[in-house]
Each structure stands twice: as C-alpha cells, then as structure tokens.
Amino acid sequence: SHRWRGFGWGTLVGTILAALAMVIAVPLSHAAWQDDGGTPLQWFGTLVVTGLVLLPAALVEELAFRGVPLIALSRALGRVPALLALALLFSLGHLGNPAVTRLGMANIALAGVFLGLAFFTPGGLWTSTGAHLGWNLTLAGLAAPVSGIPLPMPWLDYSPGIPLWLTGGSFGPEGGALATLCLVGGSMLAVGRGRRKERVRHE
C-alpha cells in the first residue's frame, strides 16, 4: 500500500508542477493553446498510449539515477552529495537532446534533485517514478516538448510565448525559469514529506 500511495502522491505532484509551469506562462508570456485538428477522444487515446510508453522509460531512468545507486552513494558520501552527484549525471544524460539550453540542463539537474528527494519519501522508487511520469506525461498531454523531444498529440497545440528564458521555447517548459520555480516548490514538498516519514519512524 505504501508503494501505491507513493506512486499516487508522486504522480499527482509531478502532474500539478508541470501543469503550473505551463499555465503560469499564459498570463506572463502569452502562451496559448490552439486547436490542432482531431478530437478530444483522439487526444485521450494518444495520452493513454503515450503514458504506456513513458511509464517504463521513467522507471528505467529512476532505477538508473535513483534506486540502488542513490542508496549506495548515500551510504558512501552522505545523502546530499549523493543527490547532487546523481542529479548532475541525470542532467548530463540529456545533453544530446534537441534544442537543449544551459537553463534546460540546470532544470533537469534540479528535477534530478526533486526526484531524489521524492525517492526518500514513503513509497521510494514508486514515488519518484510516479513524479517522473506525472511530469513528463503532463507536458506531453498539454502538447509541449518533453526535454526537447516533441511527442505527437492530436487536438491541442501549445505555443509557449516569450521570453524564451521564462517559457523554455522549443526545448519545452523544462528550459524555462517557470519550471525552475515549480521544481523548487516540488523539492520543498518532498522534503516535508520525507521529514514526516522520519518523525513517524522515531516515534
């Protein structure tokens, strides 16, 4: 039950953060959605298929960059150095992505910290996988590129608006400062949830 609760919490938080990064861009940068042809039903079908593709991809990345490596490094170096080291590797793993920017790389490292903190909350790997999936699937579902990779989505088309440093431009929201703020907020939520877990353990 810890696993499912963790997965649900992670998915919900990842979804809300990604949606916020895009929605806040509407008043600030004149971001907008247009009808791209197709129907809401086609959009939903594509969303389900995209989710089935993104879930194993998220799980594999979580196993590689959180999971056993994070536990082993935390024991060797301490939790904070381990989190930062693996977040940096996670970012470098996206260096070859299309339209990548320095802010995009920094945000992916920050996402690595957020996911690492989520890993240390109840549910562990399930929680971080849920957060990873919620973030990526929401960006894709709202018709934005995911780490520079555009995923086909009928019905909706997203125009990020300007300035690009705020919205991320063609790299997607992960290349913008709005995502930075959302990921910092998500990290704080994960720290709070992790502290509650520690308190319960000591009581």
Image (tube, rainbow, N blue to C red):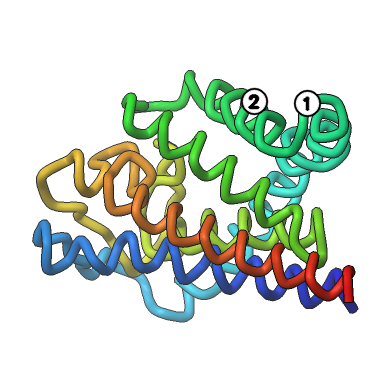
Left or right: 203 with respect to 28? right
- Quadrant of the image containing the N terminus: bottom right
Residue 77 disc label? 1
Q: Amino acid at mark 1?
A: Leu
Left or right: 20 with respect to 50? left
> Label 2's element?
helix
- Quadrant of the image containing the C terminus: bottom right
Q: Is residue 48 above or below residue 131?
A: below
Q: Residue at x 76, y 48 (%)?
A: 59
Q: Residue at x 20, y 61 (%)?
A: 25
* First in residue order: circle 2 vs circle 1: 1
> Label 1's element?
helix
Residue 62 disc label? none
Q: Amino acid at mark 2?
A: Ala
> Contact, CB < 8 Å: mark 2 with mark 1?
yes
Quadrant for residue 190, please give it. bottom right
Residue 85 disc label? 2
The image position of residue 185, as x and y in percent, is: 44, 61
Q: Is residue 34 above or below residue 114?
A: below
The image position of residue 19, as x and y in percent, is: 39, 67
Q: Residue at x 30, y 62 (%)?
A: 22
Front label number (2 vs 1): 1
Q: Report the front residue among 70 and 21.
A: 70
Q: Report the front residue among 129 and 203.
A: 203
The image position of residue 18, as x and y in percent, is: 43, 61
The extreme front residue here reads: 203
